[in-house]
Image (cartoon, grey):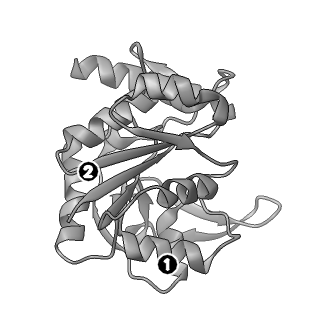
């Protein structure tokens, strides 16, 4: 079974505060996008990578990740994934991976693909939730303390049979989602979990970028 990885990289990353698309922000002299694509190929589990970027970043992206296929993404994450699926070809399995998770260990990517090859139709890497979680009302008052033992924080890459992901998107043609597995759930699919990794942290804020800089320094 062949594997294609889709990397949505059209987001502006406004919370990072650097006035450029987040995927093109540098970590130790390399764009986050470059880190993410290289990690996918280094896993040995991926046959092709398709990257979706803003129209005005096509040339820059192609220069950064010549090993990947680069196409125009959309205004929302789901629009970008749709654009990637449209050109993904006849691969059996598909991963969807955040460009903003540059330090994702190749071994974790391999775990996702291995679970798909073992028969799962949808797989997500997860971590236990360490903090106490409170449910609040519209005014911010606590209404419940959630049992964290059954909660998991979700990472990427998320993996699917191509058939399952296409079906989920076809079932929700106008729906927005930050989580592709959520669309599969809504379409009635079963989503399995595999162990994630703290290094697969998502860079969203300037603080996250500082943490990633320190982690990348330790790994060098």
Residue 134 visible within the image: yes
Q: Residue furthest bottom?
A: 188
Residue 132 visible within the image: no
The disc, 2 or 1, on the residue closer to the chain's N-terminal end is: 2
Q: Nearer the viewer, residue 213 or 70?
A: 70
Give the crowd class for mark 2: few <14, some 14-19, many >=20 residues within 10 Å. Answer: many
Q: x%, y% of residue 156?
A: 39, 52
Q: Quadrant of the C terminus?
A: top left
Above-or-below relation of 118 to 108: below
Q: Residue at x 30, y 53 (%)?
A: 196
Pointer 1 residue:
167
Q: x%, y% of residue 54?
A: 63, 36
Above-or-below relation of 85 to 29: below
Q: Tag 2, which secondary structure? A: helix
Give the crowd class for mark 1: few <14, some 14-19, many >=20 residues within 10 Å. Answer: some
- Callout 2 touching callout 1 (CB < 8 Å): no
Q: Residue at x 23, y 60 (%)?
A: 2
Q: Nearer the viewer, residue 166 or 219?
A: 166
Between label 2 and label 1, give the one nearer the viewer.
Answer: 1
Q: Residue at x 70, y 48 (%)?
A: 75
Q: Nearer the viewer, residue 96 or 192?
A: 96
Pointer 2 residue:
109
Q: x%, y% of residue 46?
A: 25, 50
Give the alpha-carbon distance from disc 2 to disc 1, as whole Å. Answer: 23 Å
Q: Residue at x 37, y 38 (%)?
A: 68
Give the quadrant of residue 102: top left
Q: Tag 1, which secondary structure? A: helix
Q: x%, y% of residue 176?
A: 67, 63
Tag shown at residue 16: none
Above-or-below relation of 150 to 110: below
Q: Is residue 133 left or right of residue 164?
A: right
């Amino acid at each position: 079974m062949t594997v294609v990885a889709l990397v949505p990289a059209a987001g502006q990353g406004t919370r990072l505060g650097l006035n450029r698309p987040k995927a093109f922000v540098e970590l130790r002299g390399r764009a986050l996008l470059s880190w993410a694509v290289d990690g996918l190929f280094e896993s040995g589990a991926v046959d092709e990578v398709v990257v979706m970027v803003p129209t005005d970043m096509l040339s820059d992206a192609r220069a950064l990740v010549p090993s990947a296929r680069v196409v125009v993404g959309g205004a929302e994450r789901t629009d970008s994934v749709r654009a990637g699926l449209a050109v993904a070809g006849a691969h059996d399995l598909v991963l969807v991976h955040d460009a903003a998770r540059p330090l994702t260990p190749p071994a974790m990517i391999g775990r996702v693909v291995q679970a798909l090859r073992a028969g799962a139709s949808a797989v997500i890497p997860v971590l236990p939730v360490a903090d106490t979680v409170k449910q609040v009302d519209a005014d911010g008052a606590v209404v419940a303390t959630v049992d964290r033992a059954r909660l998991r924080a979700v990472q990427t890459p998320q993996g699917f049979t191509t058939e399952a992901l296409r079906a989920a998107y076809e079932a929700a043609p106008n729906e927005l989602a930050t989580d592709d597995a959520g669309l599969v759930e809504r379409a009635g699919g079963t989503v399995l979990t595999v162990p994630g990794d703290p290094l697969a942290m998502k860079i969203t804020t300037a603080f996250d970028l500082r943490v990633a800089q320190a982690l990348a320094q330790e790994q060098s």
